């Protein structure tokens, strides 16, 4: 059974209203989830470098 009351323009308008909303201001000291991965990315990169150095050292010792 078809829904004759469905208005595709209405859902588009609701989506545009959702996209155009500005995020609510956050209190100082609260967690920011937008663009806050800079410190985490640095830690992951440092851990990756350490793992590569350790694996390289193990391989070098095994060949030696």
Image (spheres, rainbow, N blue to C red):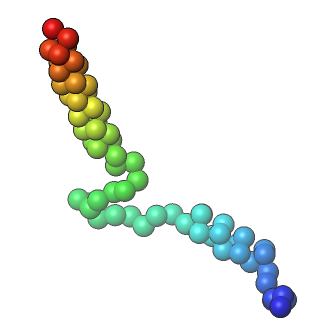
**Considering the image in quadrants, where does the N terminus appear?**
bottom right
User: Where residue 32 sits in the image (x, y, percent)?
Assistant: 33, 57
Quarter where residue 41 is shown: top left
Quarter where residue 49 is shown: top left
The residue nearer to you, when weighing 17 against 62, is 62
Can I make out residue 46 in this image? no
The residue nearer to you, when weighing 51 against 59, is 59
User: Where residue 46 sits in the image (x, y, percent)?
Assistant: 24, 31
The residue nearer to you, when weighing 62 against 18, is 62
Can I make out residue 62 in this image? yes
Would you place residue 11 above or below residue 46 in this image? below
Q: Residue at x 74, y 77 (%)?
A: 10
Name, please, the residue furthest toward the front: 63
Q: Residue at x 79, y 84 (%)?
A: 6
Q: Residue at x 17, y 16 (%)?
A: 62
Q: Residue at x 23, y 59 (%)?
A: 29
């Amino acid at each position: 059974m078809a829904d004759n009351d469905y208005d595709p323009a209405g859902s588009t308008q609701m989506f545009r209203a959702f996209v155009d909303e500005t995020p609510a201001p956050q209190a100082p000291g609260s967690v920011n989830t937008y663009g806050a991965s800079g410190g985490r990315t640095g830690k992951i990169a440092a851990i990756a470098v350490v793992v590569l150095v350790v694996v390289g050292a193990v391989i070098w010792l095994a060949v030696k």
